[in-house]
Image: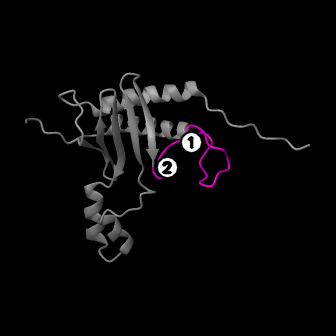
Amino acid sequence: MVMQSKKYHPRISTLMNLCEVNYMLLIRLLASNNDEEVVGDKRCYFISDFLSYQTEILEVTRYTSLVSISQTLPYSQITSATIIHPNDSYLANIANGKLSTLLRPKMVIRLYHDARMAEVISNQDIRQVKPRYDYPNSKMHLPDEKQQISQFLKEWLQLSLKLGQVNMPLFE
């Protein structure tokens, strides 16, 4: 007798809870002095000498905002790679900022201010993250890819809030 595998069904309550928590964390991370989001605003969060993140506001409408969050290469790593190994092509690529995008996470998140939720719109090479994928598939996405990405975003935001430091002018 051949057993058929059960089809994956996303748990909406778990995904909705993650979206609500991510909204709260992202709003705290984006907080500014004037309480108004402006397209093009960028902020860098330095976690350590080897890890930093950047947020950028891509779009602002009445009920939603579009935010990009990505891992960037810290300045200290660029200068040390250039000074120590100027002939190494791999490290030269790091110094020029050409490190593979596979190694640096990047997400685009839509904030729904009326529902107080944050939805991951795109992640790395996935332009439109679906709530469920059949498995196996040609791109090897997990059946619960959207939930996994939302969980990763939550951990990313928690790390940024806990250990992140921002260079901000004290007086304007």
According to the picture, the residue beneath numbered tag 1 turns out to be 145
Q: Give the residue displayed 46% in from the left and 46% down from the top.
A: 123
Q: Quick one: label 2, few (<14), some, or many (20+) residues within 10 Å?
A: few
Residue at the far front: name it.
Answer: 62
Q: Give the residue displayed 44% in from the left and 25% down from the top.
A: 20
Of residue 71 and residue 122, the one placed in the foreground of this image is: 122
Of residue 80 and residue 14, the one placed in the foreground of this image is: 14
Position of residue 23 measured from the top left corner of the image (x, y, whole percent): 39, 29
Is residue 125 one of those drawn in magenta?
A: yes
Q: Is residue 36 above or below residue 124?
A: above
What amino acid type should be assigned to the residue bearing mark 1?
Glu
Q: Quick one: label 1, few (<14), some, or many (20+) residues within 10 Å?
A: some
Position of residue 53 measured from the top left corner of the image (x, y, whole percent): 33, 46
According to the picture, the residue beneath numbered tag 2 turns out to be 126
Among the two numbered marks 1 and 2 on one chain, the one whose residue lies closer to the N terminus: 2
Q: Give the residue displayed 8% in from the left and 35% down from the top.
A: 171
The quadrant in which residue 31 appears is: top left
Position of residue 73 measured from the top left corner of the image (x, y, whole percent): 32, 55
79 vs 131, left or right, is left
Magenta residues (range): 124-145
The quarter of the rendered structure image containing the N terminus is top right
The quarter of the rendered structure image containing the C terminus is top left
Main secondary structure of the magenta stretch: loop
151 vs 40, left or right, is right
